[in-house]
Image: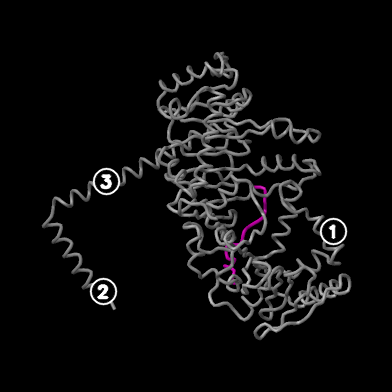
Amino acid sequence: MSNQPGRVLLQRRISRWIGDHPELLGALFLLLLLCGFAVSLIQRYLTSELRTIVKLIPEDATVTAMVSVTEEDWQQVLDYGTADSQAVTLETMGKAATQLAEVTGLEFDRDVRPWIGDRLFVAMLPPRNVSNDMAPETISTGYAPVFFLPVENPRRARQALEQSSAVAGAWQEREYQGLTIADSDTFSVVQLEKMAIISPDRTAIDRTIDAYLSETTIAKAEGYSSAWDLLAGSDSFAALYFNVESASEFLASQSVGRVDSVDRPPVRTQGSMVTLFLAEDGVELNGLSWLAPSSDRRYDRNVPTPQIAEVIPDFAVAAIVGLDFPQIWRDYLRDSQVNALLPIDPQWLRSALSSTLNLDLEKDIIAWTTGEFALAAIPAASTQSPLPLGVAAFVDTTDPKPADTFFEKLDRTVRDRYGIAVEPEKVGDRTVLRWTMRQQGLTVEHGWLTRTMAFFSVGAVVSDTFVGGVEVPLVDSDRFRAALPTSGLDNRNGFFYLDVATLLASGGLGSLRLPAEQDAIVRAIESITVTGGIQDDRRSRYDVFVRLVNGTDSVE
């Protein structure tokens, strides 16, 4: 049925109201005009700032960072967390200020803030002419930081630099590529495009000038500008851009088993950008990675949101949910060839499974984990449990037969080789196989929740918390929803969740003790959530929310 009469009546009432209040119409028009002007001004400022900085930072910079330097933003950072974590943050800021004063003779609030803009930028330039016979420590110390400071007040900036000579040493001017560079004993500075460019490495200044004049800067980096347009906003506190190819070179150089560049697989990811926003109850990060132009890989945007998370109970303290574990493993194998920081050596894992359990990692396990999967840390239902929680893995397989073969082989090996009793137990209407271990309280369980969904758990007995279904799934709980990032994609193809506060309170970390400063930071965190998804066929999206404890006392 048409709503035309109602629409006409509403229009007449609006017209009559405007006729009775003509002065408000002018005020409304003026308000809209001012709002539009303010938005346009902010966008123009950010766009202008971006145009400037991308013309200055060399294209081969491994990492580029932007951070706000406004007092309001840093006061909000100082207000986060507990009294203990606030003290650590304040101490860290104090150390940074001391280092600045030692190198330059400048105090940020007194000497820099009066002339700098709202943000500063920094780029890490990789060492040149890296060879495979160079020591890793030589390569890592060869990285040079370059700072880009927007100059809002040139007169105050000159005064500050002149004052710094008392500590940094007398200034010596030199010409390079037609530009005047001022060198001191500790750092060099040049001004370009209303930016003061500063570095403790003179050659880094020269390289920046070379990149600027030859137009070989990150302005040419594939995907950079579009990623900034998608992620950054006028209220972003910080942003990071990673040149993945350059970062891969560095990580490969730090590997124990150094791989020559000609033997390394080509890098498929071109770049990655992360922006950081300060929220009322925590910090949110929005990330984007994009494929290299040479990569023929395409992402599938039609991948469904995993439903396997429905089996995880709402009181789980940690969870990982994803799709297609074989593909994840293939990517991990590829990355392990160049990334020394990955926590597990694939070859070591293969050997360990083969020697201890007579299992072939790829053939016996990964081959059948083709559907959705989840991993969860779940507190024991029984208060009498010697262990506070168990870790359960869930796999919804498209082929249950090889999964059955795997469990049978595993049970047979532990029974025959280690004398571990494997007994069936009835949990609800399902049969669960449970290992009787010599270690007190340590239990291993496995079984089937449905015709295609298998589970395997280690630690405390937790099968009774999810076999037969859960009352409230984790993903439907209020605490999980409160921990989700506010932005990002609706169609998420996986997530990571860690309830830090509950894990600490339940004793889930056992006897683990962290250094005082790290412990203070950890106890200021309520939870961490990471979600992932596909932005388009060339870009993947990930969003993080670090929810912080609301209080002034440390968690005991």
The magenta segment: 292-307
- Nearer to the camera, 11 or 441: 441
The quadrant in which the C terminus is found is bottom right
The residue identified by callout 2 is 3
* Amino acid bearing label 1: Ser
**421, above or below 70, in the image:** below
Q: Where is residue 330 in the image (x, y as percent from the top left)?
A: 73, 58
Q: Nearer the viewer, mark 1 or mark 2?
A: 1
Residue 362 picture quarter = bottom right
Q: Residues within 10 Å of mark 3 (few under 14, many from 20)?
A: few
Q: Where is residue 161 in the image (x, y as percent from the top left)?
A: 49, 20
- Nearer to the camera, 338 or 69: 69
The residue identified by callout 1 is 351
Mark closest to the chain's N terminus, 1 or 2? 2
Q: Is residue 306 magenta?
A: yes
Mark closest to the chain's N terminus, 2 or 3? 2
At x 44% / y 19%, what residue is drawn? 159
The residue identified by callout 3 is 33
| CA separation in Å, label 2 and label 3 | 32 Å
Q: Is residue 534 visible?
A: no
